[in-house]
Amino acid sequence: MKNNGAYILIGFCLLGLMIVLFYYHKAWNTIKTENTCQIDTVEPTHQQRLPLPVLLDSMQLIKEDLQIRIDKSEYLLFVIYDTLVLRTYPTVFGTDPVSDKLMQGDRATPEGHFKVRAFYPHQSWSKFIWIDYPTEDSWKKHHTAKADNKIPQTAKIGGEIGIHGVPNNNTALITSKTNWTWGCVSLTNEDVNDLFLVVYEGMPIEITP
């Protein structure tokens, strides 16, 4: 009888442990999902992903609530709705990928808050999404750099900065993280075509170091 009691006690302990492990695993998966906010991971491969407009329709979202965030150190462009990352694209920058843009010809990609000024097809890079550099903040940085003798007094601030694709058959520029532009943000043509479908004038863009 004593042995039977011991077996019963061990059985209850094992059952309790299994219940605890079950709820722990369930809670962990919930926390992990809430923390990542990565909608796009439901699509198994790059080739099978939904076009962005289709993804928005399936979620009953509108493109005017989207914004773009670009992380230069991570070489990534994020399409964001509220706190949700809907899509992530690999990207590259100007041949000086680290510095903030201060003048024309420095080949640096500007940092800060911008908006989409216009967007249109481009014969060399598939699409061009023109951002409103230089902003008021850009001008302040430019004048400060002159005052500190970091750039020539005759330097111009530059412009024509945007998000675009790559020359045909040059996707490797993105996959190899080759910073090749004069300061623009470059995606693969497939990715810039996908992004182009949901871009609108005035769309917020944040570019971080």
Image: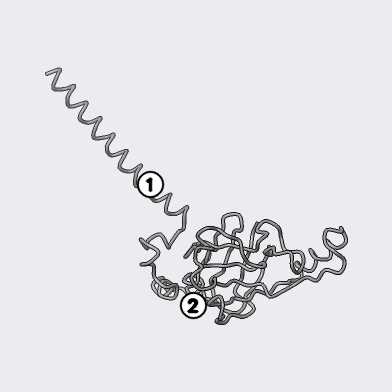
Residue at point 67%, 64% (across, down) = 109
Q: How is the image coloured?
A: one colour
Residue 27, disc? 1
Residue at point 75%, 67% (across, down) = 138
1 or 66: which is nearer to us?
Answer: 66
Q: Position of residue 149 (x, y in %)?
A: 87, 59
Locate residue 95 relative to residue 200 in the image: left or right: right
Q: How far is mark 2 from mark 1, CA to CA? A: 37 Å
In the image, is residue 178 above or below residue 128? above
136 or 145: which is nearer to us?
Answer: 145
In the image, is residue 102 above or below residue 6? below
Q: Secondary structure at mark 2?
A: loop
Q: How many marks?
A: 2
Q: Position of residue 94 (x, y in %)?
A: 65, 63
Quadrant of res 47: bottom left
Residue placed furthest toward the top: 2
Mark toward the start of the polypeptide (2 vs 1): 1
Quadrant (top left, top right, bottom left, bottom right) of the C terminus: bottom right
Q: Amino acid at mark 2?
A: Leu
Disc 2 designates what residue? 197
